[in-house]
Image: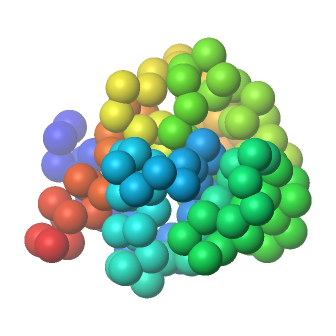
Amino acid sequence: MASDNNRLIKTILHNSKTIAVVGLSDKEYKPSFIVARYLIENNYTIFPVNPNLPSILERKCFKNLHEINKPVDIVNIFRQAEYVLPIVEEAILIGAKTIWMQLGIVNKEATALAGKAGLTVIMDHCIKIEHSRVFNR
């Protein structure tokens, strides 16, 4: 089972190019900022989703996923579990391929909804740690 999960994660990270980071902070010490900077350094296109800021990491912030108006491969969520369901509903509407809930974020209702809509879900894993692990960085 673990090797299947490893293969899935590697496939997702290899095939994905665009990542919406929901809940991205502009504070350099916050995990969301560290992860987004790492993803940029590893050639992913990042769309910051934070309605309270104009830009983060020299990229325009979007108020929500609908505002992005470009294909999104992964919706990487840095919000508390109780806020995940509406994000997943929006991700389904914009045609995202994968929902990625960061370490400590578990929402089974949102996971079931995403799965039913055909999205792949990774839950309670850090995308930076997983990328680093599967690509030996």
Q: Could you say which is closer to the camera, residue 73 or residue 23?
A: 23
Number of marks in picture: 0
* Relative to 39, 72 lies left or right: right
Q: Quadrant of the N terminus?
A: top left
**Where is residue 28 shown, x and y percent of the image?**
40, 56
- The residue positioned 43% from the left and 83% from the top of the image is 43
The quarter holding residue 99 reads: top right
**Where is residue 84 shown, x and y percent of the image?**
63, 28
- The residue positioned 31% from the left and 57% from the top of the image is 128
- Please indicate, yes or no, whether residue 7 appears anywhere in the rendered image: yes
**Where is residue 55 shown, x and y percent of the image?**
69, 65
- The residue positioned 41% from the left and 39% from the top of the image is 102
Residue lying farthest to the left in this orientation: 136
- Please indicate, yes or no, whether residue 122 appears anywhere in the rendered image: no
**Where is residue 133 shown, x and y percent of the image?**
16, 60
The quarter holding residue 94 reads: bottom right
